[in-house]
Every structure is written in structure tokens, then in C-alpha cells.
Image (cartoon, rainbow, N blue to C red):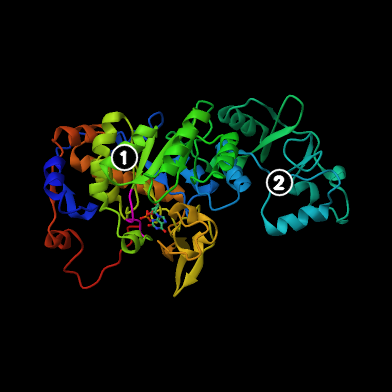
Amino acid sequence: SAETIFKAATGCQGLTYDDVILMPGHISFSAEDIDLESYVTKNIKLKTPLVSSPMDTVTEAAMAIQMALHGGLGVIHYNMPIAEQAANVREVKRYKNGFIMDPLCFTKDHTVQDVRDMKAQQSFSGIPITEDGKIGSKLFGIVTRRDIDFIADPSVKLSEVMTKKMVTATEPVGLEEANALLKTSKKGKLPVINAEGNLVALISRTDLIKNRDFPLATKDDNKQLRCGAAIGTRPEDRNRLAALAEAGVDVIVIDSSQGDSMYQHEMVKFIKSTYPAIDVVGGNVVTARQAANLIKSGVDALRVGMGVGSICTTQEVCAVGRAQASAVYNTSRISRKLGVPVWADGGIAATGHIVKALAMGAGVVMMGSMLAGTEEAPGEYFFQEGVRLKRYRGMGSIEAMSKGSEKRYFASGAKVKVAQGVSGAVVDKGSLRKYLPYLITGLRHGIQDVGMRSTAEMHEALADGTLRLELRSPAAQREGGVHSLHSFEKRSM
Ligand code: XMP
């Protein structure tokens, strides 16, 4: 059992995910039948136990939207001004699958040339014409390609060419209803207006066709996607917190490399007393004692991991941290009893590590490098030696700290900065729309092999000792990897 293995190891040696292997069980169900539902905080459940890290090369609105659509959660980083972070949260909260909430609009005084200029930069099939050229003001008409195709004079105002007779939907309208209206209208775009006739959203035929339904999506009681955001522990972070609360954030992550500090305890208590509707995640911690301290101060989940991330140098620079399987097992052993889920943060390099993290008791896993390099991660792609890459950097790297993340490492105002992370690049992984289903399917297969029907069942088996593990010797680890081939291509991720 995990207890035997970790008891034998703990006290003299920490174990990593690669040090242990799960024993297979009996399979009497299909992988699709596996229930991945798990608590991410005391109060919120996810259908997919995956969370994206608050790093400036990982999570902004685009990442958080896709994470939530697939049943996970994104945590927006805070290496940016307060207003920008709040705008990112608002973008996630306002996102509706199939509804365009920030369409490009023109006024009646814009000209045919303006449309042509815009067309040169991006494709379009219909532009709403509103009173002040923005969403939220009175809708007058719509300009489509057909309206301007044969206009010779580019200075003609859009008021003269726009289509005024439109099919519109009036708020509140659901996606299904809007879809039906679009079908019968045979139009490319359907503007959604409110009772005052102001434009509130746009629905596009192509988007509707493209957009699959997301039955796993992580939503709040208002059917809006849930969103997390990170803050620090300094007094000015209370202003950041206020702006994030105003933007509708669901989960606040107090970001610190060593979470068992008086600063964090104070911040947890402040948030819980000032914003009781927001769930607070404390961390990072790696020992049972640290976990107990933070739980006492009132956290709704614990972020676990120190110096195990792919870009981390904390263990080398500061000589503290813990091997991640030991950290997850030892913290979740006490926190699960108290209903506080553990986020296994860092060191996930393959779907097998996700399975092991959950098997060690984690409620969810938090990932940085696994999700960096996707289309939805911030930053531009570039080529190096023929490979398409995106930047990925530690929040404790000099590069990231110079943008503000030094708070995470208690280094604000320090004359000499000591880096606890590095910068690098990761390969292009394409869109999360394909990549997340791949991770989820891999996870299902792992849990199925263990013979468990759900993450909850796996946690029970961990607690009652029926989940069986073995330690892997160095030779066993070599044997479990690819070997005895002259060469091979690793294309699995
Ligand atoms: P992965 O392995 O998923 O790890 O890339 C992501 C996690 O690493 C932590 N993190 C850091 N830790 N120095 C550190 O010691 C850093 O510069 C750094 N930046 C991120 C963080 O917990 C993240 O979720």
C-alpha cells in the first residue's frame, strides 16, 4: 500500500512520480465510463482534474477559457497590471460558447474603405453598425461583403450601404434557440440585442458549425465559466484582489514558493473574512505540518510542490523542497481527511504522472510546461533549428521577476536578485481543443488500467490500502522506458 511504501521511504528518502509504479487491477468497464470528477476546492468540483499554472507563459484568458470549457480550471497569472488581470478574468466570465462578446463594430460614419482596410487584416462576413462603433450601443444595421462588393467609391459612408433589415435575437436567448434562428434566417451572422435595441453579442454561423458543445465545462451558478487568478501577499495585493473580485473571479490562488508564512496566513484570513464567496488556495507547501498550518488559517485547497517544476531551481538554490510524490502523499493524507483538496503542482511531464498524482491523493494537478507551447498559451511562436517553439519561463527566472513576479520569492526590493527558475522554450503542441482531449483520454486509460472507475474510488483505495504500488529500482525505470531500439521518434506529445 502507499502507506507502507511511503512510511519506509519517508524519514530517509523522498519519492518522485518515477520512483513508484501502480499495480494494475481488474477492468470491467470502458475508459469512457470513468468518472474524473474531483474537488478542486472545498466547494467546487471539476469534471476534469486539470488546472493551468499562473505563469506568464501559460495562463491568460485564452488558456483559462479552454481549460474551463474542457472541465478544468485556468489560473490567470499576475505578472501584469491589476486592470489587465481583471480584464482577463472578465473575458473568461463573459465567454459564452458560440456567442461573440467582443465583435468588431463600425459606426454609420465609417466608410467602405475602412471595411476594405479591415478586410485586408482579418476575414469577416458581417460587421455590426452601432451608434458609437462598439458593442453595448444601439444597433443600426450590418455590413456584409455583398453590401460593398460593387461600390466603386471607397469614401461612401456605411450608413448608405448597410443592411438595415436584419434578423436579430433578443436577450435572453440560448445557444440552441439562436442556432435555430440562424438556420431559418440563412444569414451568416445573428446580432443579439437587448430590450433597448443595443447590441449585446453576435453569433456566427461558421462558429456555430465549428463549435462543439462542451458538456464538461466548469461553470458557476449563472452558467458562466469559472476562472481562477493569482495574487501575492503584499498589502497592495488587496487592491488587486478587490479588482479581481469585482471582475467575478471564482478562485484566488495565493502565489508563493513557500506558503507557510505569516504573510500568507494573514492574506488567507483577510480574503475569507472580506470575500466569503471566493475560494482561496494556499501554498505552496510540501509537508504535513505546513499543510496543517495553512488549513488552520482557512484555505479551501492547498497547492503542493516546491522546486519540482520543469523550470525550477529552488531546490538547488535554496536547498529546500521535496520530491513530488512524497509531497503530494504526505500533504493529502491529512488534508483529504479535512475535505481540503490538494493541487499537485509541478513536475507533470506525461499523462502517467497525472494518474500517479491523483493516485497519491491529489484532487487535481496543476501544469505549466505541459500546457506551454499550445496556441492558447501567451507569446508568439518562433523557429529554432527548424522546430516551432514558444517561450516558457519560470516565474522565478530573472526575466519574469523583472516584470513583477519577484513577490513570489520574497525578493521584492532586494538589491541582488537570486533567480529560482530558468527561461527556455517548449515545442508547439497545437491547440488545446485537440491537446486537452488527448490528456484526458490518457488519464482515463491510466485509471482504467488500475481497475478504478473514478478518481473518488482511487482515493478510497489509497486510504484503505487496496491501491497497490511498487518502488521502481533504477533498472526498473530503464526497463519501463523505451529501450533496445536503434532510434525512435517520440511523437506522443
Ligand atoms: P511544471 O513542471 O508544470 O511546473 O512546468 C510548473 C510549476 O512550477 C512552479 N514554478 C517555479 N518554481 N522556480 C521554481 O522553483 C520558478 O521560477 C518557477 N516558476 C514556476 C509553479 O509552482 C508552477 O505551477
Quadrant observed for ligand 1 in the rendered image: bottom left
Residue 196 higher or lower than 188, as above or below: above
The kind of secondary structure element at disc 1 is: helix
The residue positioned 16% from the left and 63% from the top of the image is 478
The kind of secondary structure element at disc 2 is: loop
Q: Compare residues 296 and 360 and report the one nearer the observer.
A: 296
Q: Compare residues 183 and 361 and report the one nearer the observer.
A: 361
Residue 212 belongs to the span the image colors magenta: no
The residue positioned 52% from the left and 41% from the top of the image is 211
Q: Is residue 182 left or right of residue 420?
A: right
Residue under numbered circle 1: 291
The residue positioned 69% from the left and 58% from the top of the image is 121
Is the stretch drawn in magenta largely helix, strand or loop? loop
As measured in the structure, the alpha-carbon distance from the residue carrying label 1 to the one carrying label 2 is 48 Å
The amino acid at mark 2 is Leu
On residue 104, the disc is 2
The amino acid at mark 1 is Ala
On residue 49, the disc is none
Q: Compare residues 8 and 423 and report the one nearer the observer.
A: 8
Name the quadrant of the N terminus: top left
Magenta residues, start to end: 305-310
Q: Is residue 404 left or right of residue 358?
A: right
